Image (cartoon, rainbow, N blue to C red):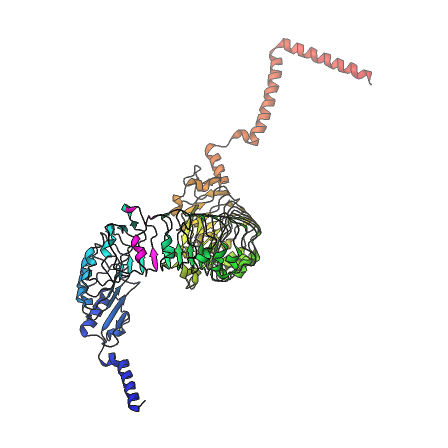
Amino acid sequence: MSSFANNFILLWFIVIRFLPCSWGQGCSIEQKRALLEIRNSTNGSVFADWDGRDCCNAPGITCDSFAGGVSSIYLQSDNAPRTWYPNVTLFTIFDELQELTLNSMNIGGELKPFCELKRLKSLSSLDLGNNLMEGTIHPCLGRIEKLEQLVLSGNRFHGNVPPLLLSNQSKIVLLDVSSNQLQGVLPFSIFANVTSLEYIDLSNNYLEVETESPSWVPTFHLTKLNLANCNLNKKNGHVVPSFIYTQLSLNWLDLSHSSIEGGIPCQLLFNTGIQGLFLRSNKLTGSFLDCNAKNQTSSIVSFDISDNQVRGPLPENIGHLLPLLEHCNMSSNALEGNIPWTLGNLSLRILDLSNNMLTGTIPQSLTKNASADSLVYLNLSKNKLQGKMLPRDSIMPSLECLQLSGNRFEGVISPTISNSPSLVILDVRHNYLSGNIPRLLYSHPSLVAVLLKGNRFEGHLLRRVCQMRSLQVLDISFNHISGGIPSCINNITFWKKSPTGSNYFTQDSQLRHLKNLSDLYFEIGTSLLIKNMEYTFNGIPLSLMTGIDMSSNQLTGSIPSEMGELSQLRSLNLSNNFLTGSIPISFRNLKNVESLDLSHNKLSGKIPSELVELTFLSVFSVAYNNLSGRIPFEQQFSTFNVTCYDGNPDLCGGRLPRNCTTPNQPDPTHKRDQKDQKEGTRVIDSPFFFYAFVAVSYAFGFWVFFGILIINKNWRMIYFRAVDRYVESFLEMLSKYW
């Protein structure tokens, strides 16, 4: 190549690289003023660090690499004003604008002012999602000449989707109006002639969507369709929309909570290219496969038929029918029989078969083959599975959540959990497991929630529990654990103080990634007994949950005062044990506790008045102990029922039937003395009364006897003769032995 050609190429590269700078500042003075005015109207929550010169340097602004004009405005702020009413005209000044994103900016008002955007001849994407907008969806947005993507989700729009929004000339590719308050009957035929349409999301409204009438022929080729929480085909027997079978490019379909009936449509499984199929919470019946699936395979990767009425066994060859399956949720059905061995041949990451009637044991293929290497979440809770907790030689290196509660597993906690170093949640509640809590559990590096409730565990709670620095939830209730509560329990970081960073569930980990899979509506979660009721915690609420439940065991000794340092606890239940001593005053530091149950123990002493400082406390019980004195009755304690104090006869005050006389003498022994003083001391019980009674009785008897002799002469003569006779008889008898 000649030197001239090389120089020309170098020159061309320099021109391309620096062309925007050579053409000017990237935007006009008028556009700079517009951005400054937008910044002022949001109280500086956007463009905060912009120096006011080159628009292209403002955060959220993208400029065209050739012309230098503003091509994209992306505004999203956590510090947006409480309600923002933007001057839409300011955005029309950017005449080369192609994309406008105002997501999560607390925009209020109606959609009509945004009709001004039709002046932007190049605008192809408009995102107003997750704001506070109200009113109806104005059809004027259909007049934006080159609009391809329209996102209005997460607002408060009502009414219906206007047909004029989608004319025959519409170039809409993506339409998202999900999570609003739209209502009424929507004939899907309004989309029939929008040939460019690829993505429709009508989910989470109050719409009744009819796809079967009036008759129509689709001209579009969808790749994604979301009709979740729509009442589908109410007038046509709640059938699966028939037009779906013509959509050969469809790879993502969500018909969850849409009232569809019948069996699982085999065509959706095998005759399309669908990779994500979600049929959760419908009225699907019949067996898993009512059709002949011989020699057929599916392209499905994510599959959810949970919360239906699907019954019968799973096909033994399910691993061959669904070879690409990675995320599978078949929970809350009526599935029976064994777990198919061929599931272990898949690269599963999520498997949820909970709340069914499955029997047998966990197949070893699931815990040692291909699935074992990739499994992150395994939930087999609430079935009729039996045998050992896990098969021998189980190795699941990626496993983060293992839920096996509500089955019939026996034996000890499987030592193979040490082969799952990433395990975060271990739930084996309500089984028949026994033995001591193994030391390998205490030394596990990642456990955040350990749920062992309702088994037959025994032995002591070892001090090794204090090594579990990441522990957030510990439930060992309804077992046979004995001994004392380790005083070192305050070493557990998440119970003692807010972590310097974030807890496990809010970190950028696999578990968090799976939890946020919007395609699956899937959240890692578990149920816990809080405030005497069972609550299910999913996603973010689970990340905030911290609690200890040691109730219904055989724990003895006193409650360690160090437990009062666990300021992040939200629930503490030590009821139904044999704990003695007093309630630690240090409990005043449990600032976040919402539920505190110390009932059915042998605690004594007073209820610390300092507990009134626990402003979040809403459930409290110290019933059936040996407590005494005045109960706290300030702040939220004034709302607690008297049953919270039952079985403590020496408690007084508040709403209790026993009143305390003075606030300075809450001790019930003093109270009884005060009551005696008030009612008068009973003289009959005093020593003085005893001696006085003896003296009076003696004097009375003496004078009654001798008084009669003095007064009556005849009785006196009879008495003296009788005395003389007894004396003579005594002397005569004495003389015989002398």
Q: Position of residue 411 (x, y in %)?
A: 57, 51
- Count how many numbered circles sit on residues in the image: 0
Q: Position of residue 473 (x, y in %)?
A: 47, 54
Quadrant in which the N terminus is drawn: bottom left
Magenta stretch containing residue 249, yes or no? yes
Farthest bottom residue? 3
Q: Position of residue 691 (x, y in %)?
A: 59, 28
Quarter-wise, where is residue 731 in the image?
top right
From the viewer's perspective, is 379 left or right of 519?
A: right
Farthest top residue? 714
Quadrant in which the C terminus is drawn: top right
The answer to whether residue 17 is above or below residue 406 is below
Q: Nearer the viewer, residue 414 or 185?
A: 185
Q: Position of residue 588 (x, y in %)?
A: 44, 52
The reply to whether residue 72 is visible in this rendering is: yes
Secondary structure mostly seen in magenta is: loop
Q: Nearer the viewer, residue 363 or 65?
A: 363
The answer to whether residue 272 is above or below residue 478 is below
From the viewer's perspective, is 737 left or right of 128?
A: right
The reply to whether residue 51 is visible in this rendering is: no
Quarter-wise, where is residue 520 in the image?
bottom left
Q: Nearer the viewer, residue 727 or 73?
A: 73
From the viewer's perspective, is 551 left or right of 737?
A: left
Magenta stretch containing residue 90, yes or no? no
**Magenta-tinted stretch:** 236-260
